Image (cartoon, helix red, strand yellow):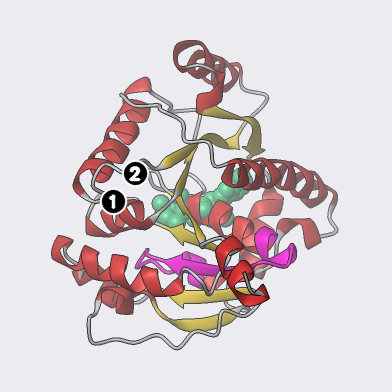
Amino acid sequence: MSKKDKAAATARPMQTIVINNRKGGVGKTMLATHLTWFLAEEGARVLFVDLDAQGNGSRTLSGEGRGGLASDLFDPEATFNLAGAAGITVLTSDERLDIVELDDVQQMVKAFGAFASLFDYCVIDTPPTWGPLNFAALTVSDHLVAPVEMKDYSLDGVEQLLKTVHAAEQKGRGGRKINFLGLLASRFNSHSPREKENFAEIVRSMGPSIIFNGVIAQRDGYEDAVAGGVPVWTLKKRAAMAAGSEMRYVLTMIRDRVEGRQVKEILP
Ligand SMILES: Nc1ncnc2c1ncn2[C@@H]1O[C@H](COP(=O)(O)OP(=O)(O)OP(=O)(O)O)[C@@H](O)[C@H]1O
Ligand SMILES: [Mg+2]
């Protein structure tokens, strides 16, 4: 085998990670942008796709490289001219995302095929409402992380999420499994007995592997990072430093689970 053939044979296709939960304001965009920074800091080529017309992720990553409009993923006339450079490339949100329909999803699958050799990772941020954009994100993704708040947690909500994943596997992916990396306790208040009890209840009823053994606490540092468009671990304030280390801990676990590639059978 020539050197070039060997490199092609060992080249790993892009790993796509979707951050998804139907609930609004749980920290999806905060996590998606930090995962993107984290992977890029490790030297990877990372594509960030903002599928939320609110555009919060695109704003937070406004200092990073632009690769075009996310809505063009659904447009058969559109072309992307992406170099797949090291660092971050953002497909930004725009209002055309609001008119994406279920019939457009297969066009996104096609567009993604062309990115597979250009990037090491793709991180997709999703809107809080269920619809074609979330279905599209689950259809193209290899891995899923679901941030959840423990204050209003319900087992029904978790089961609903897993049913949605199952539906996307059946209807969008021809039965191909999504690697469910886990729930992630987000905006967590470690002083609240109720939140701690809710976390314990999830572990009791669904087993420890359903939820990451690490949390993202509610801390001002995250707001500062999002507002400043920089990762929380670059801020010098004391509160931000605690945030930085808990965030890196969680992101390392996410990266390791992505690289482990074990597909977990956690279905309703
Ligand atoms: N752990 C945290 N501590 C403090 N503030 C946070 C934390 N996580 C997120 N926030 C803030 O809470 C707000 C909502 O977070 P974020 O936008 O990430 O949620 P979301 O799930 O993406 O919301 P949406 O469903 O509207 O897209 C933002 O202002 C963000 O800065
Ligand atoms: Mg968001």
What is the residue that sits farthest to the front in this orientation?
1
Q: Position of residue 132 (x, y in %)?
A: 22, 58
* Secondary structure under the numbered disc 2 in the rendered image: loop
Asked if disc 2 and disc 1 are in contact, CB closer than 8 Å, the reply is yes
Q: Which kind of residue does numbered mark 2 sit on?
A: Arg
Residue depicted at x 58% and y 68%: 46
Residue depicted at x 31% and y 53%: 139
Label 2 vs label 1: CA separation? 6 Å
Q: Is residue 170 magenta?
A: no
Where does label 1 land, which residue?
Answer: 129
Cβ of mark 1 under 8 A from ligand 1: no
Q: Which kind of residue does numbered mark 1 sit on?
A: Thr
Can residue 127 be seen in the rendering of this structure? no
Task: Tell me where the magenta segment starts and ends, as one range.
Answer: 38-58
Q: Based on the displayed image, in which of its 4 quarters is residue 250 positioned? A: top right
Q: Is residue 41 magenta?
A: yes
Q: Position of residue 1 (x, y in %)?
A: 62, 69
Where does label 2 land, which residue?
Answer: 22
Query: Which quarter is ligand 2 in?
Result: bottom left
Q: Nearer the viewer, residue 3 or 127?
A: 3
Q: Position of residue 66 (x, y in %)?
A: 52, 83
Residue depicted at x 34% and y 51%: 138
